[in-house]
Structures are given as C-alpha cells and as structure tokens.
Image (cartoon, rainbow, N blue to C red):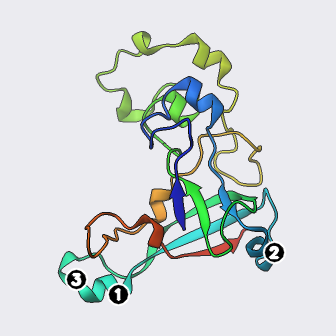
C-alpha cells in the first residue's frame, strides 16, 4: 500500500477548509484493473484492508518494541479501478478520514461531540453555510451497504499503517506497507 496527497490538500491539515473539502472529501483505494479482476472487484466495491508490522524490522531492532504481524485495526473502504496505479500496489490518499478536527473535516453538520465541546465558544464557531450546505455528509453510519458514492469525509489510512522506520534515514517507510485485502459482501 502506498499513499499520496490530493493537489488541493496539504496532508491532513486542510481537511477542515470547506472549499478544499468540497473539491476533495473522499479517498477510496485505487487499484489496477488486473489486480481488481484477480480479486473479483469493480469500482464501487468495498474491501477490508489489514496492515502488517515488519517481521524483519522487529528482528533487526527488537528494542524498539514495534511488534510484528497483523495490525489489530482494519480499514473498510470502497475502491476505484484505474490504470493509473501499478498492478502490485494499492493507493490511498493520506489527507482525509478525520473523526475529530471540525465539522467540515468530519463532514458533519452537527456540533462536536462529547469532550470536544469543552472550552469552545460554539456560537462563535457557528457557520450557517456548514449547517445548510454540507452536501457531502455521509448518513450511512459507516455501513458500506448504505454509503452513497462521493459522500463522507473519507477513510484514515493511518489505522493500518505500521510504525516502520527506514533503516537508513529513520523516516517512516510509507511505501513499504504490506497489506491484505478482502472483498466485503
């Protein structure tokens, strides 16, 4: 699995900007047609992704305590079939999928929930345009059979990304993420 950035977003820090999120607010997984055919998938189908921690990194640096094997969290999201991705890769934008931040980033017309309200001047943050014109709000409650294409705030790929520093630079090795995909019915 690899990640990329949309041309209208700067990592995840712009998902709260309404104009940017009106342009791009959804980030399905991109998959090559040959790969999709092997899994019996077509555009709009939903998959479950499981990421894996590196067994070789764990053996080389056990003191880091990164662990090895499957990551406990899974990611469910739709796919888009395109020749614009290599057959051996699956790509997901890293700029969306917030479940906090602001109403725009969450694609919700309602107020922040629970402790997120603490200390906030909600009336000062009120934006009538958000309340009447959050046309991409997803009311499916996360259930893929009720999801309407091009709605919602996307999916956070970080849930299935292991901490995997590169041996030389020490930076996160995002392009080395091994995942398993499974078609959802």
Judge by depth and name the residue closer to the eye, 161 or 111.
Answer: 161
From the top left corner, tell me how far across and down residue 34 is, in percent.
78, 74
- Residue beneath label 1, please? 56
* SS at mark 1 in the image: helix
- Dot 2 alpha-carbon crowd within 10 angstroms: few under 14, some 14 to 19, many 20 or more: few
Judge by depth and name the residue closer to the eye, 144 or 179.
Answer: 179
Residue at mark 2 to residue at mark 1: CA–CA distance: 31 Å
**139 relative to 72, above or below:** above
**34 relative to 131, above or below:** below
**144 relative to 8, above or below:** below
Q: Which mark is residue 61?
A: 3
- Residue beneath label 2, please? 37
From the top left corner, tell me how far across and down residue 33 is, in percent.
79, 68
Q: Is residue 105 left or right of residue 182?
A: left
Residue drawn at x 31%, y 82% is 57
Judge by depth and name the residue closer to the eye, 54 or 98.
Answer: 54
Residue drawn at x 67%, y 59% is 30
Please identify the quadrant where the C terminus is shown: bottom right
From the top left corner, tell me how far across and down residue 72 is, in percent.
45, 71
Q: Are marks 1 and 3 in contact (CB under 8 Å)?
A: no
Please identify the quadrant where the N terminus is shown: bottom right
Judge by depth and name the residue closer to the eye, 8 or 123.
Answer: 8
Point out the residue furthest to the left here: 63
Displayed quadrant of residue 113: top left
Residue drawn at x 43%, y 15% is 125
From the top left corner, tell me how far across and down residue 76 is, in percent.
62, 61
């Amino acid at each position: 699995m690899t990640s990329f950035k949309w041309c209208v977003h700067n990592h995840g820090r712009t998902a709260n900007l309404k104009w940017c999120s009106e342009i791009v607010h959804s980030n399905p997984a991109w998959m090559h047609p040959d790969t999709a055919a092997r899994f019996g998938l077509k555009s709009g189908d939903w998959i479950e992704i499981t990421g894996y921690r590196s067994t070789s990194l764990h053996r080389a640096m056990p003191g880091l305590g990164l662990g090895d094997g499957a990551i406990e969290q899974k990611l469910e999201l739709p796919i888009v079939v395109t020749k614009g991705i290599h057959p051996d890769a699956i790509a997901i934008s890293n700029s969306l999928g917030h479940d906090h931040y602001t109403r725009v980033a969450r694609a919700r017309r309602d107020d922040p929930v629970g402790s997120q309200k603490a200390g906030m001047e909600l009336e000062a943050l009120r934006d009538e345009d958000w309340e009447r014109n959050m046309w991409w709000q997803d009311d499916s409650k996360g259930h893929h059979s009720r999801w309407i294409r091009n709605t919602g705030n996307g999916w956070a790929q970080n849930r299935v990304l292991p901490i995997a520093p590169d041996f030389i630079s020490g930076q996160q090795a995002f392009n080395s993420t091994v995942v398993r995909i499974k078609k959802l019915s």
